[in-house]
């Protein structure tokens, strides 16, 4: 039998939101108005907010209702295809992250919060956090937040853990410029590919940043992912570009700017999604205690490998943030994306219990 969270998740997942999240935003807004006595609003970019309770301290349950484009089998003429079988809910956005979003909405409805409780669902998470950043610019800055991205199955299968940190992502491009010439007269030109490969050698020699959060090691990475240069087999190329994927850690960055010491080489950053680290020991401890109390497994503090809106909240709103959600690794953005309905029920209890105990 479907739980409250699964029932709402089915409706959210069935509603397309990869091109335009407005319809699913309207669904969320109307559901909150119908099922809660909260103050509900939707801002001009499409973010949905609800607030209830009171006090000097606020806890926000945060998600997003936009998704990446569906695979062909995940959409038909009526909308997104949703199936429930073998204890799982299948469909685009079920794992990332309409399942946990539904669990948050139900927990928001059912809880008797210890302070001000905020529900927030953003647009534009899949486009670099545009909705979250717009909300922060408009003053959204809760003291504490739980972001409902996946944290299930990190320490052990079927266990919902508490992520105290995640990596960020800095995407950058190295551009090497030279002088074109005929390949039969190489001395007449300057080979941009050679300059680019000199830059790649510098990157390979850089140390990868790492740090520790709540006793957990956070290891960054640095990888060259593309190289493009040259127009013909018999021409010395005058331009070559190299793309670099850097997974950043809190407080540390690789020294990519050193490639500009090479003549003719420049470096530019296209995207910089911040990492997240929860600095509040009590918040992390209470959340882990709640996670331990509501499930049979032995959850742990863990580190997520990829960026979420938690990074923007930590970096730009100074919010103490944790990531707790139903999805397991390897489910988001896949052709058979799914989430465990048992994990949705578990997260609904977790969010509600945490809201009633903290702050």
Image (cartoon, grey):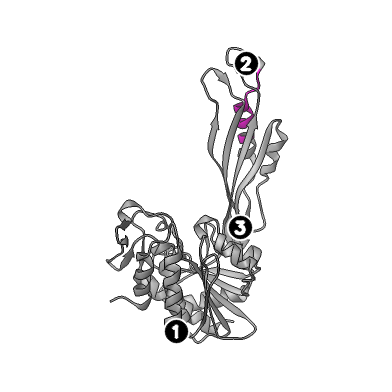
- Which residues are the magenta region? 189-200
Tag of residue 186: 2
Earlier residue among tags 1 and 2: 1
The answer to whether 22 is drawn above or below residue 115 in the figure is above
Point out residue 199 in the picture as x, y percentages from the top left corner: 64, 34
Q: Quadrant of residue 86?
A: bottom left
In-front residue for pair 24/118: 24
Which element is circle 2 on? helix
Estimate the spatial distance between the alpha carbons at disc 1 and disc 3, rounded to whole Å: 33 Å
Residue furthest out toward the top: 184
Residue furthest out toward the front: 44
Q: Quadrant of the N terminus?
A: bottom left
Q: Quadrant of the C terminus?
A: bottom right
Neighbor class of circle 1 (other Cα within 10 Å; few <14, some 14-19, many 20+) is some
Viewed as shown, does residue 302 lie left or right of 23?
A: right
The answer to whether 175 is drawn above or below residue 157 in the figure is above
Estimate the spatial distance between the alpha carbons at disc 1 and disc 2, rounded to whole Å: 73 Å
Which element is circle 3 on? loop
State the residue at coordinates (57%, 57%).
167
In-front residue for pair 346/54: 54
On the question of residue 140 being in view, the answer is yes
Q: Which residue position is annotated with label 3?
A: 274
Earlier residue among tags 2 and 3: 2
Earlier residue among tags 1 and 3: 1
Give the mark count. Answer: 3
Q: Is 199 within the magenta?
A: yes
Neighbor class of circle 2 (other Cα within 10 Å; few <14, some 14-19, many 20+) is some
Tag of residue 110: 1
Viewed as shown, does residue 16 lie left or right of 229?
A: left
Per the picture, the main secondary structure of the magenta-coloured stretch is: helix
Point out residue 253 in the picture as x, y percentages from the top left corner: 66, 51
């Amino acid at each position: 039998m479907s739980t409250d969270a699964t029932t709402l998740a089915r409706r959210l997942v069935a509603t397309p939101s990869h091109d335009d999240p407005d319809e699913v935003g309207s669904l969320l807004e109307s559901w909150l108005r119908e099922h809660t006595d909260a103050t509900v609003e939707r801002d001009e970019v499409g973010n949905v907010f609800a607030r209830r309770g009171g006090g000097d301290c606020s806890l926000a349950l945060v998600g997003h209702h936009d998704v990446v484009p569906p695979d062909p089998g995940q959409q038909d003429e009526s909308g997104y295809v949703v199936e429930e079988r073998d204890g799982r809910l299948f469909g685009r956005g079920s794992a990332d992250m309409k399942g946990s979003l539904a669990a948050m909405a139900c927990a928001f409805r059912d809880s008797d919060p210890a302070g001000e409780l905020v529900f927030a669902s953003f647009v534009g998470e899949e486009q670099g956090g545009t909705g979250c950043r717009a909300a922060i610019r408009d003053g959204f800055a809760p003291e504490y937040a739980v972001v409902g991205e996946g944290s299930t199955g990190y320490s052990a299968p079927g266990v919902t853990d508490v992520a105290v940190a995640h990596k960020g992502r800095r995407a950058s491009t190295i551009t090497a410029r030279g002088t074109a010439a005929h390949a039969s007269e190489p001395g007449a030109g300057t080979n941009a590919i050679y300059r680019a490969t000199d830059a790649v050698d510098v990157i390979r020699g850089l140390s990868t940043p790492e740090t520790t959060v709540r006793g957990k090691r956070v290891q960054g990475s640095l990888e060259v992912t593309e190289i493009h240069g040259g127009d013909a087999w018999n021409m010395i190329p005058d331009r070559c570009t190299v793309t670099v994927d850097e997974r950043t850690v809190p407080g540390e960055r690789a020294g990519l700017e050193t490639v500009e010491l090479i003549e003719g080489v420049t470096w530019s950053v296209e995207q910089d999604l911040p990492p997240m680290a929860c600095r509040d020991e009590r918040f992390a401890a209470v959340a882990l205690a709640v996670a331990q109390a509501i499930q049979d497994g032995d959850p742990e503090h863990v580190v997520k490998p990829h960026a979420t809106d938690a990074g923007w909240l930590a970096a730009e709103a100074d919010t103490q943030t944790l990531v707790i959600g139903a999805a397991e690794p390897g489910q988001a953005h896949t052709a058979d994306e799914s989430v465990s309905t048992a994990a949705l029920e578990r997260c609904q209890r977790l969010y509600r219990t945490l809201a009633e105990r903290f702050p």
